Amino acid sequence: MKFNVKPAALAVAAVAAVVALSGAAHAQNVKVAFIEGLSGPFGGVGQNQLKHFQYAAERFSGKQANSGVTVEIVPMDSKGSPQEALALLKKASDEGIHFVAQGNGSNVAGVLIDAINKFNERNPGKEVVFLNYAAIDPDFTNSKCSPWHFRFDGGVDMKLEALTNYMKDEKGIKNVYILGQNYSFGQQVSKYTKEMLAKKRPDVKIVGDELHPMGQVKDFSPYIAKMQAANADTVVTGNWGADLALLIRAANAAGFKGKFYTFYAGVIGTPTAIGAAGADRVYMVSYWHPNSAQSQIESLYTGFKQRFNEEFYTVAAVNAVRYLVAGVEKAKSTNAAAVAKAMAGMKMKGASGEDIEMRASDGALQQGMYVAEWTKAGGPAVKFDQENTGFGFKTVRYLMPEQAAMPTTCKMPKRP
Amino acid sequence: MTDSALRPLYFKPRNGVRIVVWSAFAALLLLLPLVARSSFAQTLLCATGIAAIACMSYNMLLGQAGMLSFGHAVYTGLATFVAVHAMNRVGAGWWLPMWAIPLVGGLAGLAFGVVIGYVTTRKAGTPFAMITLGVGELVFAGALMFPEFFGGESGVSANRTAGAGWLKDVGITFGPQLQVYYLIAIYLFLCSAAMYAFTLTPVGRIANAVRDNAERAEFVGYDTRWVRYLVVMASSFFAGIAGGLTAINVEVATADLLYSVRSGQYLLFTFLGGVGFFFGPLIGSVLLVFALVVLSELTKAWQLYVGIVFLIMVVYAPGGFAALLMLNLRRIKYGEWRKMRWPYAGMAFFGAIALWGFAAIVEMLYQAQDAAVTGSALSVAGIKLDSATVSSWVLAMAVLMVGAFGFEVWRRRFKRVWDDGEERIAEAIKKAEAAIV
Amino acid sequence: MSTLNGVSYGLLLFMLSAGLTLIFSMMGVLNFAHASFYMLGAYFAYQVSSWTNFWVAFVVAPLLVAVLGGLFERAVLRKTHRFGHVAELLVTFGLSFVILELVQLVWGRTAVDYRVPAALDGALFQLYNANFPTYRAFMMVVAIAMLLALFLVLRKTRIGLVIQAALTHPETTEALGHNVPRVFALVFAGGCALAALAGVIGGNAFITEPGMAQAVGAIIFVVVVVGGMGSLAGALIASLLIGLMQTFAIGLDWSFIGALKSVGVEVTPESFGYPLWKLKLSQVAPILPYLLLVVMLIVRPKGILGTRDD
Amino acid sequence: MSEFALELNNVTKRFGKTEIIRGVNLAVRKGERVAVIGPNGAGKSTLFNLISGRFEPSGGDIRLNGENVAGMRPYQINRRGLARSFQITNIFPRLSVFENLRAAALYASGQKYSFWRPLSALTELNDRTEALMASIELKRRRDVAATLLTYSEQRALEIGITIAGGAEVILLDEPTAGMSHSETDRFVHLIRNVTVGKTLLTVEHDMSVVFGLADRIAVLVYGEVIAFDAPERVRADARVREAYLGAVLEAQEATA
């Protein structure tokens, strides 16, 4: 497999090579317990993320990355249940695995952070580090921040900063309708959207702010009817999975012309479900997408698609692996506490060539943010379509890491 | 033994067997951690202990009173939430000792049983099943609507080492998993004893009568709805204790504790264990933890296996594993078991072969689905296969057919021997009856 | 508009619960896997329509599911009959697991691209500023056609008469020796076909994914209980009621706070039970069916048109 | 207190449009044995179902020891001292014979819904149950599940369950249905023994049983009691002969 070496990646590879030479004497093996729902209703997403991790480990550790550090991903099926995830955490530490990766579901992540804090306190010397690649509850890097937790995705606050930054300049936006699933993520989307829009676009009216039970709604047409009645031209929604797909289908069927600003339109299965229904009206905020002009990892994307026939989108998995490898190299040890210390504050080049930093003060990766539009594929701006639908994402706004950075209220406990 | 207070309730001198069984149970609980030393093994034991209480409480409904509930997780789950809040209060200075938290859970379970049971027990039979399902969905969806109590999606966490008390002074902080295990073991023993005692009380017996024939029970003076209501309350109390123990064991309550899938698991594994006997759910709880924690790690197809095993059991052995065990004990009692050794061995041998063939096919199917990630090679019970080659498929199918054929041959032999034995036992019983009066 | 949305959703629910009610009243079996057959219908329709077209799938998919349902009845369900209704229910419960796994094995764990056919895509007419989709109208037509067909079959054919007798007097019909296994298999297959038909037209209107069975499973049980066990007309009324109720509730932002305000009581975040009072009707809309179930049980345990008391 | 154990005043029952019971009047004195006879479909079983609370009457009142019990649930009526048996055996199939009888005696023994006392400690109840079991001749089948009994054993158990609670008014719905002659004789003897001193109503087709057991006979035809009197007089009643008994007696004489 050939790796299209771009400057940033080259830099990483170079550093890796140097370190690899010094550490070549003792090749190090790091196991990462990948605790995710791999069966059951959300198993599809979990399996897909697992592929990202395995692929990232292949490409960015060990032989292919010319590193002395080899990352091995150990999948563990939590079935999406926090309770099961806790049992697996114990199992992982029993097997001598001190790194845990998880991301689907802030509920599981929150429980894991808490359990890891307790575990590390009770078992000094056997610490566990949590590599969170997708749970974006801002609390995790604010009120609940922990020295053992590293988040490689952008927080809700960062993402909405980017989204509202784009909305600010869209003069067509007059009436915004906020719809979300009734749990902390949906509530936070609603809260930050209102706060940020009030600051950036005080003229915009919030004509609706609605929460519905997660995964319970089968027919979204009444919600669409309500949006139409409220004259909404823009919808901001944190919905994901079936809740998002159903929403957009219902909008299309009812002839609702407004635009949708979303977080998870790119997650496996969702592009298929949205299809043509969402063309030119669905936007997504993310830290990367395949058609981002600055993308440094096109070969990764195509390689992944070729191999698995699935879309590559979780760059956070790649970054998690890269940080882990670099952390081990820097600490010259696989001891989790030492690696955590090494990763805190570490800087790298990101997927878009930007300078990314694992901020030591709250464990949140500072990275660039994209707002992209779902549109017909073709031409240089939309090179790749998603899931063979003929539609893909087009960058409409890019924020540099420093633009997307958000303040933190975290009072980080002293790193041991 | 800890249940000396309960002993006069049902221990009659002639019931020496009972004393032996219960003592063995206590000894087993006491000694298990010596075998299971790793912390993961202890976690498994704890999970099994809690599941055992939950399944036994479930069986009070299904096995004893014939009430098929799809909402048992509501009681265990809500109790966990209450218990977790109580633990946080303890942390904030309440006088309650930590070991009493499961009782708090039990009382919470009872309270929910009083409220929810009032509605659900208005119906029996199939409507009852549907209603518990609906109420379960209601509670689950409601949990996410009240983050103030349920803590939203990340739930509510607590610390089991909080609080003071004389136990702390002697070094029992419940920090180490082993101490939690013994707390669970003590509760398990007490709860099983109490639930067993319940089966021997008038209400326990009338619950059986209502299960068998609700209409007739009305004609001998019992308000069957009230009986159902009482049983639901009793069952929810013990379910609540299981919920309280969960709070101590995992120190966090999350909404998935209330999910209908969990209720379904209680039903499924209680049934597999055997609803007809008191100890059936114990077997069920071991199977539950085995399937959910061990089997699901071994294979991606675990849900398919569980589903198929369940189907087979419902059709061919509706009494569950407990009934199979008891049938064999009966054979031993009448001295008929020895004749079945060879048929059993034959069936086991060919059964294992067929199982391998079947598992190989299933595993290859799953492997083929994810071949891109993990490659097409796999091994089933140590034998290497490749889902991309025809030979592997042919091998698996051939093995399955050989196994199935051999199994069928031996099954027929087995049936002959079994039926023979059945006749002799029937005769023996008739003789014994004739001897009475 | 909301009325039309509500009615069309309600009719879809009725298509699902009609089969369930038929099977239940005829055989006493609560088919727990009913929603799984609904899912199978959608997946088969997806597969068949990707080979041929939607209209072929529209006919073939329900028939395929009916055959599967009939086979299951003969091969498995019949064997458990002697163990009683609980065992029968459990067998279908186990089946729902197996179907779910097999669907995931064959079609993967994520949504498949099952679309509304082009001929039915688009708006039928406009009302205020909203479109009424042609496909929704199609769904309603199919549901009503099914309702009529069901009515005719039940009223005009011999099997229909036997089934109808079983609806009202299960014991008597049994005593008359009409419970020939063939009728059982036929009814079970027919019920499954109805569920599959709902899947065919619901799968593309909504979404075809492995979670779709569980999403409707609980709701149709609510419909059957609220309508009254074994009452087809009751199921129809309950379906429409639930469809309309959910649709209208979403449009209403009522909450207890508002209601209390209008009678002069001010509620603040400090008041007792604030989290409950602040919930808006639109927020709780999707769980209203379950609330309806609870209320129904308290005031009228028989269900709307139920005749059986327990 | 009323002098009648059971009184029916103008009791009616409709199913939809059909009126099955069309104004039945009946007054049974304490300690009396009454047989209810009549052609098939006359409403005998329906009448029992109304009295015992299985169905709710559409009109009229039913007095048990003077108290109107119409519309009460079966368990309420049972607690007021009325027990019944069923034409189609209605027992607790998975419980043993002993448990069947004990469960049936439990409520009346004052245990009601208690869950703080083990059954084994209820010595008096257990002794009484053993005695009852002996009197219905099922002692040797004590621990056998009821469903495994033979048909006539199940019929005996049915009677045992009915009388276990010590009710003063007993309703037996075709107790000897489906039994051979010799069994019937034995069974009538058994019924007579176990119901000494009680008020007894029984539906019966076998005329020898009727005339052997009853103090008075009520003839039910098309939902109405057309005669209610001592056996000889009923036998002599022209209306009864015309409506029912004539044909039956001829048939029985012919087979005899």
Image (cartoon, coloured by chain):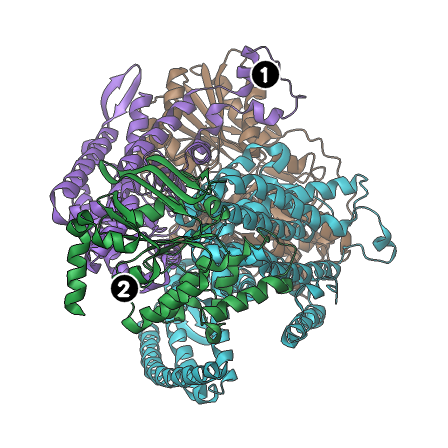
Q: CA distance from mark 1 to mark 2?
A: 100 Å
Image position, residue D85 (x, y; %): 39, 56
Q: Which residue is mark 2?
A: D208
User: Which colour represents chain D?
Assistant: green
| Residues packed near mark 2 inside 10 Å, few (<14), some (14 to 19) or many (20 plus) | few
Q: Any mark on residue A199, and which?
A: 1
Looking at this view, is C69 or D178 the one in front?
A: D178
Tell me if I can see residue A102 in this picture: no
Q: Residue at x 49, y 38 (%)?
A: B138
- Examine the image and state in which quarter residue D245 appears: bottom left
Q: Quadrant of the N terminus of chain A?
A: bottom left
* B397 up-or-down from A271: above or below: below
Q: Residue at x 50, y 81 (%)?
A: B436
Of the two numbered discs 1 and 2 in the rendering, the one whose residue sits closer to the viewer: 2
Q: How many numbered marks, from 0 up?
A: 2
User: Which colour represents chain A?
Assistant: brown
Image position, residue D252 (x, y; %): 18, 64
